[in-house]
Image (tube, rainbow, N blue to C red):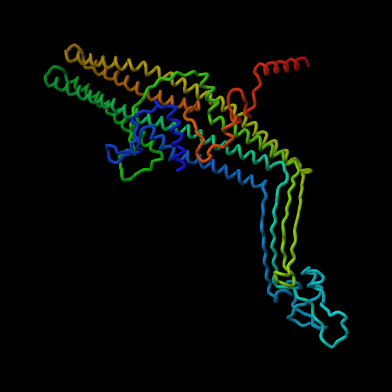
Amino acid sequence: MRNFFLSLGILATFGLLCPSSFGGSETTSRTGTGSAGRVPTFTLNQAIVTALQQNPTLLNAEQEIKRTKGVIIQVRAQALPQVNARAEFEWIDPNLTGARIFGTTSTTTGTGTTPGTTTGGAGAAALIESPRSQIRDVQSPLAAASPTPPITNAQGSDVSYSISVLGSQLIFNGTTFNEIRGTFFQRDSAYFAFRNILDQLLATVKTQFYQVVVNRELIKVQEQSVHLLESQLKDQQNRFEAGTVPRFNVLQAEVALYNQLPLLITAQNNYRISKITLAKTLGLDFQPRRGESPPLEVIGEMPYIPRSIALADAIELGKERRPFLKQARANVLNQLQQVRATAGQWLPTITTTGGGEWVSSPINSSWHDISKGWIAIVQGSVPIWDSGAIAGQVIQQRALLSETKITYDDDVRQVELEIQQAYSNLQQNEELIKSQEKNVELADEALRLAKARLDAGAGVQLDVLNAQVQLLTAQTTRLQALFGYNSSLAEFDRATGAQSTYHEMFANLAPRATKTKTYYTGSGVDAEGKAKQAEDTVVRTSIRRSRTSDSK
């Protein structure tokens, strides 16, 4: 249910941004009934909503956000109190007591030794380690000589148990708190990865939707050409039977027709493949009952809405809004915390432990005869000499930090490249559309005149065939240019980060830090988000350093 509201909210914002970019009829239901049975039908809006709800790549990215939240909880627990309870119960058969203590089974009674009984006295008392008052011989006060037998030593209990409840708390170290900050940046990185995948998904769905539309239109163009060639063949056959044209004209018309049929078959296959590809992106499962029926049908036409674009402004907008760059910034900040956490191993570590313990009596298993008390421990440690182990780790982490900064700078250039490529493709396809719109009209008129001349006996069949080929080429080029323009427009919106915007109201999906200036990625800041040094200052500094080195 949350996924539904997430995708619905994002789509609503997307629709407000680009209301005129959608083709096809606007219906309220997501699925419908096609001409070939119960086949779901989609407009572009409906296809986008379905992809946001069911696309596995996007769903996996959402689960990655949840995983990073679990990492935060796990690492944060190292700095919070931890309480553990431990209980131990032990019972030893009295027949084994002597063997476990002395390795013998003899006992002393009076002055003699009798096999088969345990031995009391100082040896047993030393092993049990009970208080002196619990193991010494129990004698009557002011005892006088008496013929009665003496009282034997107290025997140890065959049951022992202990219970302890201890709590521990980290007071200080140089690693945990930096690692916690690093996990926050990992969570932010996962969120921006989710947004980046979402933008890519929107562009992919639009491109694949338009691919289905253009393939459908190409089939119409090919069918129109085949029908025209069939009528041309029939006309030449009638003329041949009437004796007005040679057999060569009939053969030429047949060859032209059969050369056109493979193009129609290819267009039909491309249409089927494009629908299957779109169904996979939308997360639609294969239905065995439909057999060879198409998995879906699309409703819509190929729109052409020219857009005025300022390239410099578009590049700056892309730098500021691309989740791709914000994810790279989060990776840099995370690695910076890893460097600090690694260097923090040189600092002292202080922990404290406290709690209570209950221990049974060694000669009595009664709960009322136990020893109990409190325990308090403060521990501290500091590395003195580790033969460079920590220093080696710091060097590694600093190198990784430099790598992430270099990657961020390259990602900035990658965004600039993608925007310029999409802009160039938009210009190319816009010019192609304008040129081919007029060309289609001219080719259609040329075909009409060639047929009229042939009917009047003033032209030849070859002129009609050539005119037909020219018209087919112009129509195909125009459709491809329309598809290229819409596809490039979707890519341009993705590259500039304008594919969609986000209202953060979906179960705390967006971390609070992602709304701050921490992730501003405009031209004026570096990989860590710090203001860049002015270019002229950098030039003057480099010149000054060069002069100083030359003077030396």
Quarter of the figure that contains the N terminus: top left
Query: What residue is drawn where x is 72% and y is 61%?
Result: 357
- What's the residue at 41%, 40% (across, down)? 283
Q: Residue at x 71, y 47 (%)?
A: 170
Dividing the picture into quadrants, the one containing residue 471 is top left
Give how far across and how far down residue 361 sits, in percent: 74, 69
Q: From the viewer's side, name the closer residue of 155 and 346.
A: 155
Q: Can you say which quadrant of the picture contains the C terminus?
A: top right
Q: Is residue 109 above or below residue 397?
A: below
Left or right: 69 as drawn, with respect to 210: right
Determine the image quadrant of residue 296: top left
Q: Residue at x 58, y 45 (%)?
A: 70
In the figure, is residue 502 to the left or right of 407?
left
The spot of residue 522 in percent (x, y) is: 58, 24
The reply, left or right, for residue 171 in relation to residue 36 is: right
Measuring from the top left, give residue 312's x and y in whole percent.
Answer: 52, 18
In front: 476, or 535?
535
